[in-house]
Image: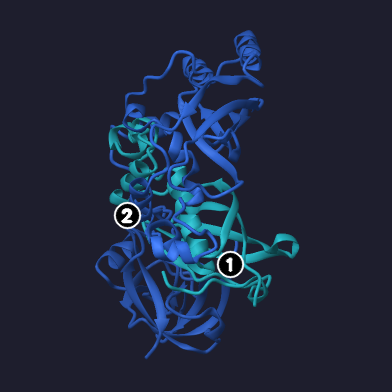
Chain colours: A cyan, B blue
Amino acid sequence: MSIETLRYQDVNVGDALPELPIALTSSLIVAGAVASQDYTPVHHDKEAAEAAGMQDVFMNILTTNGLVSRFVTDWAGIDARITGVSIKLGTPNLPGDTMTLTGAVAEKDETGNAVTVEVTGKNAWGNHVTGTVKLTLPAGD
Amino acid sequence: MAISGTEREEFEKQLEAYVGLDIGLEDRGRDPVNAAMVRHWCEAMGDACGAYTDAAEAAASVHGELVAPPTMLQTWILGGVSMASGESDPRDKQKELHRLFDSKGFTGVVATNTEQEYTRYLKMGDEIRAKTVIESISEQKATGLGIGYFINTRSTFRDQNDEEVGWLTFRVLKFEIAEASASSSSEAAAPSRPQRLKPALGHDNAWWWDCVEKDELAIQRCSRCQALRHPPRPMCGECQASDWDFVFSTGQGTIYSFVVIRHPEVPGYTYPLVVAVVELEEGTRFVGNVLDIDPEEVEIGMPVQASIELVDDEMKLPVFRRAQ
């Protein structure tokens, strides 16, 4: 990514982040589970997922977190530092669906140039993830 | 059915013994933080941030060198393939607690919340370990998934210098899987996307839905006074005759009235949702969704054209778009 990092001064409460649609495929769900070292069977084995009451393999939390973090740094740039994530999980992410990430700046705090972004990831069944990401941005020149 | 009476009391007493417990094991990363695992992660997530995978960009950034994505924190201590077997260290109190829930029928498990804080970004070579405490267990709750209990845990992560690098909490629901969803695996697969409510079909309206199946928008007509009516019903509101036939509509009309629904959102529809009463050119009115239009642009009197389309995996409905 060669986008320039946003500066603390450039960001205003209410600024919307560019929407990010994520095509939910079995490949993404399994790749995310494996890359996060989470081999809990429901994330890669359809039979195990069905036995747990789901219709197919579903996305693990680490992948959700990874996508949320990507969504925020795609917008904020390389010099942003994520300091915290707080999310609530809703409808599962299942193959064949699309999750669209949207977000906006909710708070700014000059101490440490901290910014809080509210994030929602929505699929056909409703909200998969809602929450906040805290980050710090460099001060402007 | 969920346990009750003295069995439940005894079970909940057993649960109390777990609150505040360190789960008894320290999870140690099997590999130090490394570029290969970071790259696999970034490829899976589609994350192209140079701080993680491009040494030159990372060096020029505030990070100063390659770092791991902060949300990878837990990855460094997870068990990998060994997790698939479901076997666990018998000393693991968290697993023991889950087995206790399983034994009482609360076999479902789903995480509902996580909160994480990162003290610093991890660098290549960092060696990570974590200790986990069972912070609390809720009272029995009736949830959308079934009856169950929420378990809150907190894991604290440290590096090779025993410095804290971050923490995370998880809120997990252990629940009794509802009969209907447990049996769904042996029956027809659940739909891949939300399905619309099906109409109740009967003698008075099934013919109309049959027409929709054949891509025709039918309008019922009184055989005596020729008045058109919709939705279908057995008697003419004008002359009370019960003989009827029908005509096919061209689907052309104008918006007579409309609303824009923004909340609450029902799965299976796209919001904001324009619902219009359309005055069909044949002379009766019809309620339908207006698609592919900015709700701000919808106006009373706007010409629209119906087409009959699949709105989910099975159901066809007339929908409207702005006429060209």
Query: Where is residue A127 shown, x and y percent of the image?
Result: 52, 54
**Which of label 1 and label 2 is nearer to you?**
2
**With respect to residue B119, does B48 lie above or below?**
below
Residue at x 31%, y 57% (from the top left corner): B313
Residue that numbered label 1 is attached to: B262
Q: Amino acid at mark 1?
A: Arg
> In whole angstroms, how far apart are the C-alphas of marks 1 and 2?
25 Å
Residue at x 63%, y 9% (from the top left corner): B10
On what subunit does the disc labeled 1 rest?
B
Residue that numbered label 2 is attached to: A96
Query: Where is residue A23 shown, x and y percent of the image?
Result: 35, 59
Mark 1 nearby-residue class (10 Å; few <14, some 14–19, many ≥20): few
Same chain for labels 1 and 2? Say yes or no: no
Query: Where is residue B192 shown, x and y percent of the image?
Result: 34, 51
Q: Amino acid at mark 2?
A: Gly
> Could you tell me which quadrant the C terminus of chain A lies in?
bottom right
Q: Is residue A101 visible?
A: no
Residue at x 56%, y 16% (from the top left corner): B3
Q: Nearer the viewer, residue B222 or B91?
A: B91
Q: Secondary structure at mark 1?
A: loop
Q: Along the horizontal axis of the image, is B250 left or right of A128?
A: left
Query: Where is residue A9 shown, x and y percent of the image?
Result: 67, 75
Q: Is residue A78 visible?
A: yes
Q: Secondary structure at mark 2?
A: loop
On what subunit does the disc labeled 2 rest?
A
Asked if labels 2 and 1 touch by Cβ distance under 8 angstroms, the answer is: no
**With respect to residue B45, does B12 lie above or below?**
above
Residue at x 44%, y 38% (from the top left corner): B76
| Residue furthest to the left | B214
Q: Nearer the viewer, residue A65 or A78?
A: A78
